Image (cartoon, rainbow, N blue to C red):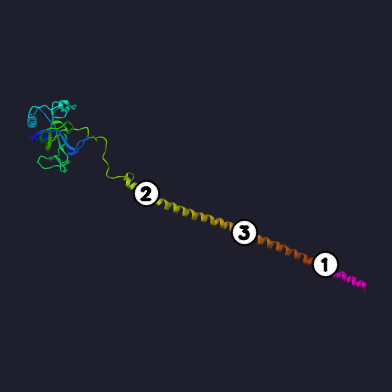
Amino acid sequence: MAKNGYSENFEVMLHNVRLAYSHHWKPRTKEGQRSKYKSWFILDPDSKDGKKNIKLLEDAISAAKLDLFQDASYRIRGEGKLCLQDGDEWTEELMHGMKLLRATRPAQKKSGEPNPPHVLNRKAKAVRLGEPQAPYSGCYVIACVGIWAMDKPSEEGGKQVCCRLEAIQFYEDGDRIESDFDFDVSGKFKALEDDKDEDEAPRSKRRASRDEGEDEAPRSSRSRRSRDEDEGEEDEAPRSKRRASRDDAEDEDEPRSSRGRRSSRVEDDEEEAPRSRRRSRDEDEEDTRRSSRAR
């Protein structure tokens, strides 16, 4: 029964549908909108399961329109206003000839609690990203969705028929579908060796070593300065010793020359003494001769 501009929710089980451009692990946020989980499902109208799935969805859409607009054939106008779309309108060739279903889910409940969809493996057990049989874009799944219609002012979304994402279960593998937000790392990285050379040591270790080296640098500088000062003192010591030796030598030369001069004077005195003595004898002899003549 329609209420407050919303129709009743009509549950649909889709079997063997292909998952595409799916954000069932982590919600996405667009500017001005609430965060949502979002998945696309590809339905092949030529396959048995595809035909059945499309019929179930069309019936649920008609029921939602009838409940809200009292007209099962009510035309929803505006791009993106109807959850079931024609793949020929897409640029990707993969979608051509297919029917596409857009399903979303608010990331949070009204209470603020997280509101992720249920994600299951083939044994109907909860599965996490990276585990075996975790659904991915390109695989085939069984999905539970809810179809509902809304009639609100244009600023609140206007008239739409929407699909609520309830749960997905891994069915079988398929070719992975890359999206505009997927990144191909092939050829961009290479395997790293476990044994790293010292030159390839972590930067933090190299920085630590460099810092330790900087800490040690002043010490080594101080050590070198101390050694240089010691060597300088050693160099100065011989110079002072050489100067002292030279001064000592000069002091020694001076006494020697003084002694030499004194020796020369002594020798001169000694030479003068005999001469004096010889003159005294001559004078005595002269006096004796004079006294003899006087007598």
Judged by its main secondary structure, the magenta piece is helix
84 left or right of 266? left
The one of 67 and 228 positioned closer to us in this rendering: 67
Q: Distance between the residues labelled 2 and 1?
A: 100 Å
Q: Residue at x 39, y 49 (%)?
A: 214
The one of 8 and 291 positioned closer to us in this rendering: 8
Q: Which residue lies furthest to the bottom in this view?
A: 295
Identify whether 246 is placed above or below 207: below
Residue 168 spot, x, y in % from top left: 12, 37
10 Å neighbourhood of mark 1: few (<14), some, or many (≥20)? few
Q: Name the residue under label 2.
A: 211
The one of 15 and 72 positioned closer to us in this rendering: 72
In this view, the mark in front (1 or 3): 3
The one of 274 and 208 positioned closer to us in this rendering: 208
Question: Where are the magenta residues, as a range?
Answer: 278-295
User: Magenta span has 212?
Assistant: no
Identify whether 112 is placed above or below 251: above
In this view, the mark in front (3 or 2): 2
Nearer-N-terminus badge (2/1) = 2
Q: Residue at x 40, y 52 (%)?
A: 216
- Mark 1: secondary structure: helix
Q: Distance between the residues labelled 3 and 2?
A: 56 Å
Q: Identify residue type, mark 2.
A: Asp
Say which mark, if any, is on residue 249: 3
10 Å neighbourhood of mark 3: few (<14), some, or many (≥20)? few
- Mark 2: secondary structure: helix
Quarter of the view holding residue 241: bottom right
Name the quarter where the N terminus is drawn: top left
Say which mark, if any, is on residue 25: none
Residue 61 spot, x, y in % from top left: 9, 31
